[in-house]
Image: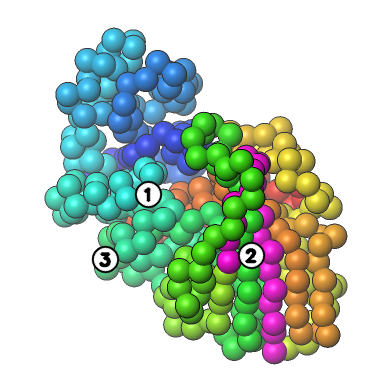
Amino acid sequence: MSRKIVHVVGTGTIGEPLIGLLCDFRNELGIDEVTFHKNTPLTTDRSKVLNLIKNRGARLTTHEEKFDGFVDLGLNPDFSTEEAIDRASVVIDCTPKGVGHANKNKFYEKYSNNTLGFVAQGSESGFGKRYARGINDDSLVVGEDKFIQVVSCNTHNLSTIVNTLTLDEGADNLIDGKFLLIRRANDLSQSKNFVPSPQVGVHGDSQFGTHHASDAYELFKTRGISLDLFSSAMKINSQYMHILHFTLKVKNKTSITKVIDKLQKNDRIALTDKINANEVFSFGRDHGHFGRILNQAVVSVPSLSVIDENTIVGFCFTPQDGNSILSSISIAEWFLYPNSYEDKIQCLKPLFFDEV
């Protein structure tokens, strides 16, 4: 396979900025072509699709039976759904929950022999090996890992906090971790499923609580580490950002100075003196690529506290519309360039913030 083609399925909250970023850094990432699948021809989405085609240089694909609908909108698909998958080096699926599994069964397994790898974003548990950039890169096995699940936005946040503040001092340093995910109701671009008031979640798992702790547990398990994690979740009537409250009990003595120093040394974490989600979100819209904060977590420094030298408490914001994008690009580059992908993705470093 000589040409390096990355195909993105979906143009939603993650798909659209991912396509844009892949196109903007195509040369630096060693990608020859970016294609994307749009399922439904909508007049409300025409401006978005036109921007990806004309301004970014991506190529549109869809189901054959929907070609006419796109043509009626002045959009000309270059390939059918299966043609695009067949010619792709890597496929990144950014569709809603459940669709990635359906696509795997219907399309991806069919073309697995001539495609380097398939990636599903977010909550597609069981799609493949869980992955988050900087957490379990060493667990990837060339020739064996064909299907990858990039973990959800909140799992990225939770996992990078655990990894940065506890596991650097040994796999047994974390005694236990307790988390509360305070979730925004929906994204700014979405009109459905908004909640009128705070809504508490349920603990569906007696060991982990919600899927966030369970997903993080499985993520670290790929490194041979078993952690004591428990998470709760709730939704609030806001569209800005998820917020993670964490309580980490550690074996080794620590201090607030040590905690901040560890956070500062991780370039995938941003620090902020802000305490309001709207201000953090607004910073991303003003200064981020495609208006996104790509850091895996934004930690509110005023919220940090250390109790009795062994319990770390604090809040951090989850950039839910951007913090998983690095992992998607990183794993795509790993499929394309397994021996040099870490060097390739350094071109994205200027897009990450030290401070928000």
Residue that badge 2 annotates: 180
Q: Residue at x 49, y 83 (%)?
A: 226
Q: Is residue 108 left or right of residue 156?
A: left
Type of secondary structure dominating the magenta stretch: strand
Rendered image quadrant of residue 307: bottom right
Is mark 2 in CB contact (under 8 Å) with mark 3? no
Going by the numbered disc 1, the residue's amino acid type is: Lys
Is mark 2 in CB contact (under 8 Å) with mark 1? no
x%, y% of residue 27?
46, 37
Residue that badge 1 annotates: 97
Q: Residue at x 17, y 26 (%)?
A: 64
Task: Determine whether 37 is above or below 135 in the image.
Answer: above
Label 2, label 1: how many angstroms apart (C-alpha)? 22 Å
Is mark 1 in CB contact (under 8 Å) with mark 3? no
The residue closer to the viewer here, 139 or 283, is 283
Q: Earlier along the polypeptide chain: callout 2 or callout 1?
A: 1
x%, y% of residue 148?
35, 59
Residues in magenta? Answer: 232-251
Q: Residue at x 59, y 88 (%)?
A: 172
Label 2, label 3: how many angstroms apart (C-alpha)? 38 Å
Q: Which mark is residue 158?
A: none
Residue 283 at least partly seen: yes
Task: Determine whether 67 is above or below 154 in the image.
Answer: above
Rendered image quadrant of residue 290: top right
Going by the numbered disc 2, the residue's amino acid type is: Leu
Residue that badge 3 annotates: 143
Other-residue count near label 1 (Cα within 10 Å), few / some / many at <14 / 14–19 / ≥20: some
